[in-house]
Amino acid sequence: MRKLKLIWDFRGPDAHKIAEHHEIHLKEYVKIKKLAITITGVEDNGDIHSIAYLVVDEADMKPIRDALKPHRGQVYNP
């Protein structure tokens, strides 16, 4: 099954810290909803752009996308 990476973008001098904090909330959501999601993370894309992400099965994406409103998504390639 194809996996999708749901992405939240953060920009500015505090982007990394904000992305790390957002990842905490993503993990809380996974725990509360008892989802079988194990891949979350934070990546830096330069000095003032960081992302938080959550990897989901394509079949499960729509309700998670609608609830969490990511900025964008892409196919996950580990």
Image (spheres, helix red, strand yellow):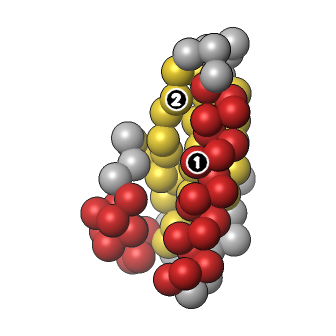
- Whether residue 53 is visible to the viewer of this picture, yes or no, is yes
The percent coordinates of residue 61 (x first, y second) are 39, 68
Say left or right for 37 vs 67.
right
* Residue pictured at 49% horizontal, 45% vertical: 7
Quarter-wise, where is residue 36 in the image? Answer: bottom right
| Residue occupying the point 48% across, 41% down | 8
CB under 8 Å between discs 2 and 1: yes
Q: Residue furthest bottom?
A: 34
Amino acid residing under circle 2: Phe
Residue at 65 percent across and 46 percent down: it is: 21
The three-letter amino acid code for the residue at tag 1 is: His
Disc 2/disc 1 C-alpha distance (Å): 10 Å
* Residue 50 in picture, x, y percent from top left: 62, 29
Of 56 and 68, nearer the camera is 68
Q: Quadrant of residue 18?
A: top right
Q: Which residue is mark 1?
A: 22
Q: In this rendering, is residue 19 above or below 40?
A: above
